[in-house]
Amino acid sequence: MRHGLLVLLSAGLAAAEDGMSGWLRYAPLSCSRSSPPSLPQTIVALNATKSSPVYAAGRELQKGLQGIFARQVQVTGQTTNDSSVIVGSVAQYTRATGDSTVPSLEEDGYWLNIKGDSVQIVGQNERGALYGTFEYLSMLAQGNFSDVTKVSNPSAPIRWTNEWDNMDGSIERGFAGPSIFFANGVVVDDTSRVAAYGRLLASIGINGVVINNVNANATLLTAQNIRGIGRVADAMRPYGIQIGISLNFDSPKSFGHLAMSDPLDAGVIAFWTDITSQIYRQIPDFAGYLVKANSEGQPGPITYNRTLADGANLFAKAVQPYGGIVMFRAFVYDQLNESDWHADRADAAVNYFKPLDGEFDDNVVVQIKYGPIDFQVREPASPLFANLPKTNMAIELQITQEYLGQQCHLVYIPPLWKTVLDFDLKVDGQPSLVRDIVSGERFKRPLGGYAGVVNVGTNSTWLGSHLAMSNLYAYGRLAWDPTGDPQAILQDWIRLTFGPNRNVVDIITKMSMDSWPAYENYTGNLGIQTLTDILYTHFGPNPASQDDNGWGQWTRADRAGIGMDRTVSNGTGFAGQYPAQVAAAYEAPATTPDELLLWFHHVPYTYPLHSGKTVIQHFYDAHYAGAETAQTFPALWEGLRGKIDDQRFEEVLFRLRFQAGHSIVWRDAISEFYLNKSSIPDQAGRVGHHPYRLEAEDMQLSGYKVVALNPFEMASNSKAVVTSSNATGGTLAARLGFESGVYDLGVNYYDIIGGRARYEVYLNEKLVGEWMGDNVDSGRLGHTPSMMLDGHSATRITFGGVEVKEGDMLKIVGTPDGAEMAPVDYVVLLPEGVVD
Ligand code: GCU
């Protein structure tokens, strides 16, 4: 244990916590020592202006000391000789104390100097002082009372979030309720949640927020809404956060009633100059614009035969006089034809942007998704990072789990981000880590950094799930310092969010660190992408949806083989977009890592991996292993009962149980699909064999009928049952042939939007359990809902420890509601330790 770190016990559990304070709870600590550590007696904040970050820092210190130690400490503007914590910018500090020995700092950086009860927190600017304050409070809240002298500077100037909020209050790929920024076409009046969000973001070093969807609506530009953006900026300013907005490229035409939106047209230029001046009049510290152009149906400069650089520079010139910047997204691609072996969506970004290198204005930053496709469970680093040495770049990461379980599955994502940030692209044979490229360091660029798509909502948990907040926390920490260790960052978050109990820290660490590998295992392996339904919800499995359409997320799976041939020699040529050494490695299957094999190569199912397994056997094994890991999560979490407040404990348990069940839906759908494609059986004999299941279609049906599912792999044995009418219920009955014993009894059913069917399960007329299919209708699970019986709506509910005797009569009574015809797939009886 480090010097000064006390052994702490959590001081009793608050009865219920709703997650609103995130990791900034300042929960009370009780110390094993009889006397508490020496703490500053006074807070000296060197700016008394209420909208200033230094003022906010003073209040935050007061709140923290009150919460953690029950100490009431006054904030003053006067320096004192007594024990104090003093906070301000370098200029303020030097003026107030005459001390000019503060080490030199970079923009937004801070110096933190702790000697017992004498603490100096000095920022290069006020924002930096606030960051240092949060760092000091984070130490205290974790019971770390060490003396420290340290300088901390951010890796990059741009550390932003993007929020995909729509004007009507909905959020694209948001899973936690409606927007905190907009409702009914306008900016909300009450900005208290906006301010609370700003506080959370400032504590992890975020300095900019783009508040509306990249698929932008021009009505954000009305005078009323510009005033509204001003309110949002006012709410976030005390936290050092600047506001930006996404623009719709066609606004001159659609909103300004011009004939067109050609970026070189004088009228169009005047339109944007005018809008920009209106915005800066309202918000002098406005950060700038984010632009999605010529992408997925959005208008853009190419529509007018201009280049993407012409489009970016149009906005860049408008904001340049005010010091603003333009984030221009590289997510530009076209629909393609799969019958062309050489066609590849992954090629698009380099093809579009590389020829424009050097043509972007200095205040343009090209914002590049981490991988060439779209936030998949694993992708190689985007080669575009290696191809724009004369352009500012930022990496776009996704905190909202669009393709990663939509916050209904625990997936701690930083280990995935690190595979990209730490990847060496070896540009010109020189070390070229992606993190050093986006920081601006590698190519000596003045701007660069991070954009994280977060999509918080009004749900008190912000993201819909308490555990998902580790991703937001870690995003900020990694944008500040991408060399950070994902596990160490996670553990800070756990202690701050759930307290310092060793057991709590160990268990949440284990689950979280196991979660991304597990999710990759039970979704898409070997670089084949997530295998979710890309045409519908992006939530559950649907491997067929990847192919036979123009979206270019192809797997090219047929009877003989699988994978995209992206080699230069025989494929799409994508591998050749990397610098020579990396390209050479990806060109050959032998030198491509297993986890990206199918990204770069089309191989037979029997192709042997480096691991020695065949591709198809790896698929089966990984899917079984991943689902098995997910089964451990609820049990691990159960071990924390009583060590976490009831509300968060139960809410997390509910989601982990859902995940355990849904991971089996994933496992079975993907395994069955590829068994069917390849006709190669699972060597372990598991796929297609379910000895512990009773298929609903094989039971005695009364008031129920059998339906065949399409795609077939969306149901166990490809069939399910639904009530024959939506007015009257039905029953399913079966005599159990299982050996007498204690089982977990699971029912796989479908929970669709538009109905709340009811279910009761009986054994010999004795009620075992009852529930309602309302996880999606109630919003209890915030994932994108489905209207169909499919891999998104497939759900398992489990009743533990049920005593069963051979010959018992099982009965399920289903009562339909609305569109939901009490659908059931199967019942499973699991002896201890069995997963089926
Ligand atoms: C994904 C996502 C869209 C989003 C797009 C983007 O395709 O599904 O909802 O608009 O990315 O990043 O622009």
Image: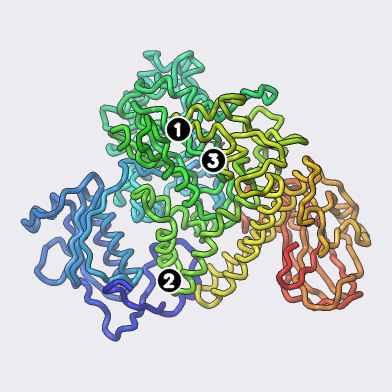
Q: Nearer the viewer, residue 741 or 170?
A: 741
Which residue shows up at 77% across the image and 59% down it? Answer: 748
Q: Which mark is residue 499?
A: 2
Q: Could you classify mark 2 by the number of other residues whose Cα lies within 10 Å: few (under 14), some (14-19), or many (20 or more)?
A: many
Secondary structure beneath disc 1? helix
Q: Could you classify mark 1 by the number of other residues whose Cα lies within 10 Å: few (under 14), some (14-19), or many (20 or more)?
A: some
Q: CA distance from mark 3 to mark 2?
A: 35 Å
Q: Which mark is residue 581?
A: 1
What residue type is disc 3 on? Glu
Q: Ligand 1 appears in which quadrant? A: top right
Looking at the image, residue 339 lies above or below residue 759: above
Q: Is residue 255 something that shows in the picture? A: no
Q: CA distance from mark 1 to mark 3?
A: 18 Å
Cβ–Cβ under 8 Å for marks 3 and 2 = no
Q: For marks 3 and 2, give the one nearer the viewer.
A: 3
Q: Give the percent coordinates (x, y) of residue 115.
A: 18, 69
| Sooner in the amino-acid sequence: mark 1 or mark 3 | 3
Q: Give the percent coordinates (x, y) of residue 173.
A: 56, 44
Q: For marks 2 and 1, give the one nearer the viewer.
A: 1
The furthest residue to the left: 98
Quadrant containing the N terminus is bottom left
Which residue shows up at 47% across the image and 49% down it? Answer: 180
Which residue was labeled with disc 3? 379
The furthest residue to the bottom: 34
Name the image quarter holding residue 658. Answer: bottom right
Q: Is residue 94 left or right of residue 202?
A: left
Q: Is residue 551 left or right of residue 138?
A: right
Which residue shows up at 22% across the image and 54% down it? Answer: 151
What residue type is disc 2 on? Gly
